[in-house]
Image (cartoon, grey):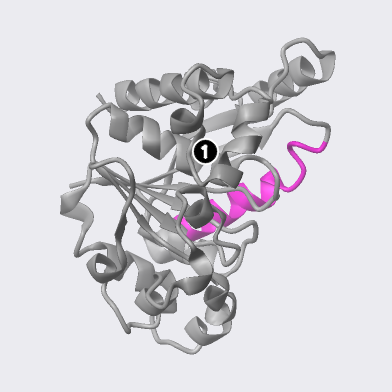
Amino acid sequence: MGEVISIINQKGGCGKTTTAVNLSTALALMDKKVLVIDLDPQGNATTGFGVQKGELENTIYTVLSRQNNMEEVMIPTILDDLYIVPSNISLSGAEVELSREIGYHSILQDAIKSVKGMFDYILIDVPPSLGILTLNALVASDSVIIPIQAEYYALEGMADLLKTINLVEERLKTSANIKGILITLYDSRTRLARDVHQEVKKYFGEEEYIFKTTIPRNVRLAEAPSYGKPCILYDQESAGTTAYLKLAQELISRDG
Protein backbone atom coordinates (compact mmCIF):
# COMPACT_ATOMS: atom_id res chain seq x y z
CA MET A 1 0.00 0.00 0.00
CA GLY A 2 1.20 3.52 -0.79
CA GLU A 3 2.25 5.97 1.88
CA VAL A 4 0.04 9.05 2.21
CA ILE A 5 2.06 12.15 3.13
CA SER A 6 0.58 15.58 3.81
CA ILE A 7 2.78 18.59 3.14
CA ILE A 8 1.51 20.93 5.80
CA ASN A 9 2.08 24.28 7.48
CA GLN A 10 -0.62 26.84 8.20
CA LYS A 11 1.78 29.62 7.23
CA GLY A 12 1.66 30.60 3.57
CA GLY A 13 4.75 31.12 1.44
CA CYS A 14 6.82 28.38 3.03
CA GLY A 15 7.12 26.18 -0.06
CA LYS A 16 4.35 23.61 0.43
CA THR A 17 3.18 23.61 -3.18
CA THR A 18 6.70 23.87 -4.59
CA THR A 19 7.59 20.84 -2.51
CA ALA A 20 4.50 18.86 -3.51
CA VAL A 21 5.12 19.48 -7.21
CA ASN A 22 8.88 18.95 -7.29
CA LEU A 23 9.21 16.16 -4.73
CA SER A 24 6.51 14.16 -6.51
CA THR A 25 8.27 14.68 -9.84
CA ALA A 26 11.61 13.61 -8.38
CA LEU A 27 10.03 10.46 -6.91
CA ALA A 28 8.41 9.62 -10.27
CA LEU A 29 11.79 10.01 -11.98
CA MET A 30 13.10 7.46 -9.48
CA ASP A 31 10.57 4.90 -10.69
CA LYS A 32 8.03 5.49 -7.94
CA LYS A 33 4.37 5.75 -8.83
CA VAL A 34 3.04 8.97 -7.32
CA LEU A 35 -0.28 10.77 -6.94
CA VAL A 36 -0.51 14.43 -5.94
CA ILE A 37 -3.78 15.58 -4.37
CA ASP A 38 -4.22 19.34 -4.62
CA LEU A 39 -6.30 20.16 -1.54
CA ASP A 40 -5.87 23.93 -1.77
CA PRO A 41 -8.69 26.02 -3.34
CA GLN A 42 -6.01 28.20 -4.93
CA GLY A 43 -5.10 25.22 -7.12
CA ASN A 44 -1.44 26.18 -7.41
CA ALA A 45 -0.20 22.59 -7.57
CA THR A 46 -2.67 22.00 -10.40
CA THR A 47 -1.26 25.00 -12.30
CA GLY A 48 2.26 23.82 -11.50
CA PHE A 49 1.64 20.75 -13.65
CA GLY A 50 0.29 22.80 -16.53
CA VAL A 51 -3.38 21.90 -15.93
CA GLN A 52 -5.89 24.65 -16.78
CA LYS A 53 -7.82 24.60 -13.51
CA GLY A 54 -10.54 27.05 -14.56
CA GLU A 55 -11.86 24.66 -17.21
CA LEU A 56 -12.18 21.65 -14.90
CA GLU A 57 -15.51 20.23 -13.81
CA ASN A 58 -14.21 17.15 -11.98
CA THR A 59 -11.80 18.01 -9.16
CA ILE A 60 -11.02 17.09 -5.56
CA TYR A 61 -14.17 19.07 -4.69
CA THR A 62 -16.38 16.65 -6.62
CA VAL A 63 -14.62 13.78 -4.84
CA LEU A 64 -15.22 15.26 -1.38
CA SER A 65 -18.85 15.99 -2.30
CA ARG A 66 -19.15 12.35 -3.45
CA GLN A 67 -19.97 13.16 -7.07
CA ASN A 68 -16.88 11.31 -8.31
CA ASN A 69 -14.43 8.78 -6.98
CA MET A 70 -10.72 9.52 -6.87
CA GLU A 71 -9.80 7.47 -9.93
CA GLU A 72 -12.33 9.36 -12.08
CA VAL A 73 -10.66 12.73 -11.48
CA MET A 74 -6.98 11.73 -11.65
CA ILE A 75 -5.13 13.47 -14.50
CA PRO A 76 -1.91 12.06 -15.99
CA THR A 77 1.07 14.40 -16.16
CA ILE A 78 3.98 14.49 -18.59
CA LEU A 79 5.58 11.66 -16.58
CA ASP A 80 4.10 8.17 -16.89
CA ASP A 81 4.17 7.41 -13.16
CA LEU A 82 2.86 10.76 -11.91
CA TYR A 83 -0.81 11.79 -11.60
CA ILE A 84 -2.62 14.73 -10.06
CA VAL A 85 -6.07 15.13 -8.55
CA PRO A 86 -6.68 18.79 -9.43
CA SER A 87 -8.30 21.62 -7.52
CA ASN A 88 -9.82 24.99 -8.29
CA ILE A 89 -11.87 27.70 -6.63
CA SER A 90 -14.90 25.40 -6.36
CA LEU A 91 -13.18 23.86 -3.33
CA SER A 92 -13.42 27.15 -1.41
CA GLY A 93 -16.91 26.39 -0.13
CA ALA A 94 -16.17 22.80 0.80
CA GLU A 95 -15.37 23.44 4.46
CA VAL A 96 -18.89 24.69 5.18
CA GLU A 97 -20.46 21.83 3.22
CA LEU A 98 -18.26 19.17 4.79
CA SER A 99 -19.00 20.39 8.31
CA ARG A 100 -22.63 19.29 7.84
CA GLU A 101 -21.64 15.71 7.00
CA ILE A 102 -21.52 12.88 9.52
CA GLY A 103 -17.92 11.72 9.77
CA TYR A 104 -16.76 14.78 7.82
CA HIS A 105 -13.20 14.41 9.08
CA SER A 106 -12.67 11.10 7.26
CA ILE A 107 -14.19 11.82 3.84
CA LEU A 108 -10.78 12.21 2.16
CA GLN A 109 -9.42 9.13 3.89
CA ASP A 110 -12.36 7.07 2.57
CA ALA A 111 -11.87 8.46 -0.95
CA ILE A 112 -8.17 7.61 -1.00
CA LYS A 113 -8.74 3.96 -0.06
CA SER A 114 -9.78 3.04 -3.59
CA VAL A 115 -6.48 4.20 -5.12
CA LYS A 116 -3.98 3.74 -2.29
CA GLY A 117 -2.79 0.41 -3.61
CA MET A 118 -2.01 1.91 -7.03
CA PHE A 119 0.75 4.24 -5.80
CA ASP A 120 3.99 4.17 -3.84
CA TYR A 121 3.39 7.70 -2.57
CA ILE A 122 0.35 9.95 -2.34
CA LEU A 123 1.32 13.55 -1.55
CA ILE A 124 -1.34 15.99 -0.35
CA ASP A 125 -0.77 19.72 -0.88
CA VAL A 126 -2.58 21.11 2.17
CA PRO A 127 -4.01 24.67 2.30
CA PRO A 128 -2.44 27.24 4.66
CA SER A 129 -5.00 26.91 7.45
CA LEU A 130 -6.01 24.59 10.29
CA GLY A 131 -9.57 24.08 9.03
CA ILE A 132 -11.63 21.10 7.94
CA LEU A 133 -9.63 20.46 4.75
CA THR A 134 -6.44 20.26 6.79
CA LEU A 135 -8.16 18.00 9.31
CA ASN A 136 -9.20 15.68 6.47
CA ALA A 137 -5.62 15.62 5.18
CA LEU A 138 -4.25 14.71 8.62
CA VAL A 139 -6.77 11.92 9.14
CA ALA A 140 -5.98 10.51 5.69
CA SER A 141 -2.19 10.68 6.15
CA ASP A 142 0.35 8.19 7.37
CA SER A 143 2.88 10.98 7.91
CA VAL A 144 3.51 14.68 7.37
CA ILE A 145 6.29 16.82 5.95
CA ILE A 146 6.46 20.31 7.46
CA PRO A 147 8.23 22.91 5.29
CA ILE A 148 9.66 25.79 7.32
CA GLN A 149 11.12 28.79 5.56
CA ALA A 150 14.52 30.05 6.74
CA GLU A 151 13.10 33.43 7.73
CA TYR A 152 12.52 35.38 10.94
CA TYR A 153 8.95 34.27 11.68
CA ALA A 154 9.56 30.66 10.68
CA LEU A 155 8.49 29.02 13.95
CA GLU A 156 5.52 31.29 14.56
CA GLY A 157 2.41 29.16 14.77
CA MET A 158 4.35 25.90 14.93
CA ALA A 159 2.98 25.11 18.40
CA ASP A 160 -0.58 25.38 17.04
CA LEU A 161 0.23 23.05 14.15
CA LEU A 162 1.84 20.42 16.39
CA LYS A 163 -1.08 20.68 18.82
CA THR A 164 -3.51 20.06 15.94
CA ILE A 165 -1.52 17.01 14.79
CA ASN A 166 -1.52 15.62 18.35
CA LEU A 167 -5.25 16.28 18.84
CA VAL A 168 -6.08 14.44 15.61
CA GLU A 169 -3.98 11.50 16.77
CA GLU A 170 -5.54 11.39 20.26
CA ARG A 171 -9.19 12.07 19.49
CA LEU A 172 -9.61 10.41 16.11
CA LYS A 173 -7.24 7.49 16.77
CA THR A 174 -5.17 8.14 13.69
CA SER A 175 -1.44 8.58 13.41
CA ALA A 176 0.14 11.15 11.12
CA ASN A 177 3.76 10.92 12.24
CA ILE A 178 6.24 13.65 11.38
CA LYS A 179 8.19 12.30 8.42
CA GLY A 180 10.48 15.30 8.48
CA ILE A 181 10.94 19.03 8.88
CA LEU A 182 12.08 20.60 5.61
CA ILE A 183 14.02 23.88 5.63
CA THR A 184 13.05 25.93 2.56
CA LEU A 185 14.07 29.28 1.04
CA TYR A 186 17.51 28.64 2.52
CA ASP A 187 20.50 30.85 1.74
CA SER A 188 23.59 29.56 3.52
CA ARG A 189 25.35 32.88 2.89
CA THR A 190 23.13 34.70 5.37
CA ARG A 191 23.48 34.51 9.11
CA LEU A 192 19.68 34.68 9.48
CA ALA A 193 19.18 31.45 7.54
CA ARG A 194 21.82 29.65 9.57
CA ASP A 195 20.31 30.97 12.82
CA VAL A 196 16.81 29.82 11.85
CA HIS A 197 18.18 26.37 11.00
CA GLN A 198 19.70 26.16 14.48
CA GLU A 199 16.44 27.36 16.08
CA VAL A 200 14.48 24.65 14.27
CA LYS A 201 16.91 22.04 15.61
CA LYS A 202 16.47 23.39 19.14
CA TYR A 203 12.68 23.56 18.80
CA PHE A 204 12.24 19.96 17.72
CA GLY A 205 14.95 18.64 19.99
CA GLU A 206 15.83 15.62 17.87
CA GLU A 207 17.85 16.22 14.74
CA GLU A 208 16.56 13.07 13.01
CA TYR A 209 13.23 14.88 12.55
CA ILE A 210 14.93 17.37 10.24
CA PHE A 211 15.77 16.49 6.64
CA LYS A 212 19.46 16.83 5.88
CA THR A 213 18.48 18.29 2.51
CA THR A 214 17.61 21.99 2.50
CA ILE A 215 15.76 23.73 -0.32
CA PRO A 216 17.56 26.86 -1.52
CA ARG A 217 16.08 30.21 -2.39
CA ASN A 218 16.18 29.70 -6.16
CA VAL A 219 14.93 31.78 -9.10
CA ARG A 220 14.21 28.70 -11.24
CA LEU A 221 11.90 27.26 -8.58
CA ALA A 222 9.94 30.51 -8.66
CA GLU A 223 9.84 30.71 -12.47
CA ALA A 224 8.84 27.14 -13.28
CA PRO A 225 5.11 27.36 -12.35
CA SER A 226 4.55 30.15 -14.89
CA TYR A 227 5.61 27.63 -17.56
CA GLY A 228 3.33 24.93 -16.17
CA LYS A 229 6.24 22.67 -15.30
CA PRO A 230 7.94 21.35 -12.19
CA CYS A 231 11.39 22.92 -11.84
CA ILE A 232 12.94 19.50 -12.32
CA LEU A 233 11.57 19.42 -15.88
CA TYR A 234 11.96 23.17 -16.50
CA ASP A 235 15.67 23.39 -15.65
CA GLN A 236 17.41 20.12 -14.90
CA GLU A 237 20.65 21.85 -13.86
CA SER A 238 19.23 24.32 -11.34
CA ALA A 239 20.03 24.28 -7.64
CA GLY A 240 16.33 23.74 -6.91
CA THR A 241 16.23 20.64 -9.08
CA THR A 242 19.33 19.22 -7.41
CA ALA A 243 17.83 19.84 -3.97
CA TYR A 244 14.53 18.11 -4.68
CA LEU A 245 16.25 15.11 -6.24
CA LYS A 246 18.33 14.82 -3.05
CA LEU A 247 15.19 15.18 -0.94
CA ALA A 248 13.48 12.36 -2.86
CA GLN A 249 16.49 10.12 -2.31
CA GLU A 250 16.49 10.96 1.39
CA LEU A 251 12.76 10.24 1.67
CA ILE A 252 13.14 6.87 -0.05
CA SER A 253 16.08 5.96 2.19
CA ARG A 254 14.03 6.82 5.31
CA ASP A 255 11.31 4.47 4.11
CA GLY A 256 13.84 1.78 3.24
Residue, disc 1: 19
Main SS class of the magenta portion in the image: helix
Q: Is residue 133 left or right of residue 130?
A: left
Residue numbers of the magenta segment: 153-169
Looking at the rendering, which quadrant does residue 245 occupy? top left
> Does residue 196 lie above or below 114 as drawn?
above
Looking at the rendering, which quadrant does residue 32 occupy? top left
Question: Residue 99, how many percent across, how many down?
Answer: 52, 83
Q: Is residue 84 left or right of residue 48?
A: left
- Rendered residue at 39%/39% (across/down): 24
The amino acid at mark 1 is Thr
Farthest residue to the top: give it.
189
> Does residue 43 lie above or below 207 as drawn?
below
Question: Residue 152, how many percent across, how many down?
Answer: 83, 32
- Rendered residue at 52%/54% (across/down): 47
Question: Residue 201, how many percent across, how many down?
Answer: 64, 22
Is 113 in the magenta? no
Is 158 in the magenta? yes
For residue 245, say whether it is visible. yes
